Image (cartoon, rainbow, N blue to C red):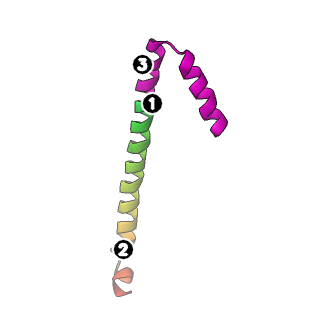
Amino acid sequence: MIKNRENIEQELQQASDEILEELYEYIKYLQYKQQNTSLKTAFASEVVLGKDWSSPEEEQA
């Protein structure tokens, strides 16, 4: 993973401002997408687990 970071840093040093701007927007998109996916997974898990937690058997335990 360190090698990837080093390679990216080398490429960034040579990139034009236009490429850097586009790259920045793409990074922000990827972060948003990852965050959004994590939230969807958390909400889905809550719904599924809520069904188990709300069962009569679970209430007795």
Give x and y (percent) for residue 21.
42, 19
The amino acid type, in three-letter code, at marker 3 is Glu
Secondary structure state at the residue bearing disc 1: helix
Q: Quadrant of residue 42?
A: bottom left
Q: CA distance from mark 1 to mark 2?
A: 38 Å
Specify the quadrant that holds the N terminus. Answer: top right
Q: Nearer the viewer, residue 32 or 44?
A: 32
The amino acid type, in three-letter code, at marker 1 is Ile
Q: Give the mark toward the camera: 1 or 2.
A: 1
Bounds of the magenta segment: 1-27
* Residue 21: image tag: 3
The amino acid type, in three-letter code, at marker 2 is Trp
Q: Nearer the viewer, residue 61 or 32?
A: 32
Secondary structure state at the residue bearing disc 3: helix
User: Residue at left 45%, top 34%?
Assistant: 30
Q: Vertical placement of 50 versus 15: above or below?
A: below
Would you say residue 60 sits in the magenta stretch?
A: no
Q: Earlier in the sequence, mark 2 or mark 3?
A: 3
Q: CA distance from mark 2 to mark 3?
A: 47 Å
| Residue located beneath label 1 in the image | 27
* Residue 41: image tag: none
Q: Earlier in the sequence, mark 1 or mark 3?
A: 3
| Residue located beneath label 2 in the image | 53
Give x and y (percent) for residue 40.
38, 49
Q: Earlier in the sequence, mark 1 or mark 2?
A: 1
Q: Vertical placement of 48 versus 53: above or below?
A: above
User: Residue at left 58%, top 27%?
Assistant: 8
Q: Nearer the viewer, residue 11 or 32?
A: 11
Question: Which SS does the magenta portion mostly show?
Answer: helix
